[in-house]
Image (cartoon, coloured by chain):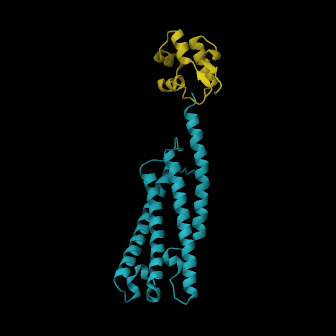
Chain colours: A yellow, B cyan
Amino acid sequence: MPIIVNLDVMMARRKMSLNELSEKVDITLSNLSILKTGKAKAIRFSTLEAICKVLDCQPADILEYQPDR
Amino acid sequence: MDIKISSQQILRVLLVLCWIIFIGVCIDAGGFLVSSIYWSFVKPNADGFFWNKLPMLSLYQYDKGHFMAICLLICIVAVIKASIFYRIIALLQENKLNMAKPFTREVGSFLFLTAWLTIMVGFFCSYAGKYVGQLTSKGIPMPGMKEMGLAGSDVWFFMGATLLVIGFIFKRGIELQAENDLTI
């Protein structure tokens, strides 16, 4: 998929673990893992908002578009 | 007073009904199989020996090949009917039908296979109808299609086509459910 999720990069920058983010965003660890590994098909605005709020970043810091080669 | 019937209750009633029909169809299939094998190896002398007392002696005396072909068609249809009901029972009994998330690959494959089995029954019934018609036109007294369990090919075709359409809609439902599951 040409949409890349850079959640792991932002988590590393903020020095936040998956467990901590999961607790703060109120999303299950398995769902967060699906999002992190790029297996997710879609993301709700509410989820994106919560992640951006906790990680103090913009949606563009988490999502990136890379066209298929 | 309002009487609310839940899906689970309907499914439970359906399971009981399917068990009753399955037992009946199995007895029928077994009866036809045993009668056919018995008549193939032991020369019959009376109609009473065949399952359901079907008057098959005239056909047997006319040509053993035609008799075997009709018996084979009867047995195939009876066995497929039994297998259809077995599949329904297996689906309901093993709780593969999850009402919270009904669009599963198991149920999808069940629908498709049942649809094809139903169409197969329709095809065999239709072929048997033409075959019996040909034999009747030659003046051989034949049992009724209903007595042989070969009636209603059009109904089987209709049911198969309907199941196939539901199967295709279900396939889309499986995709949508998978997409929904992967929406975070």
Determine the residue positioned at 54% across, 75% down: B128
Can you say whether B8 is above or below B101 in the image? below
Q: Position of residue B174 (x, y in %)?
A: 56, 43
Check the picture and name the quadrant holding the C terminus of chain B.
top right
Give B107 or B21, whichever is nearer the viewer: B107
Q: Nearer the viewer, residue B40 or B84?
A: B40
Can you see residue B6?
Answer: no
Quarter of image, res A25: top right
What percent of the width, then of the height, locates residue B1? 57, 51
Horizontally, is A43 left or right of B76 in the view? right
Farthest residue toward the left? B42
Q: Quadrant of residue B60?
A: bottom left
Q: Residue furthest front?
A: A69
Q: Furthest residue to the top?
A: A14
Q: Is residue A21 above or below residue B150?
A: above
Q: Tell me where residue B87 appears, x and y as whole percent.
A: 45, 57
Q: Is residue B40 visible?
A: yes
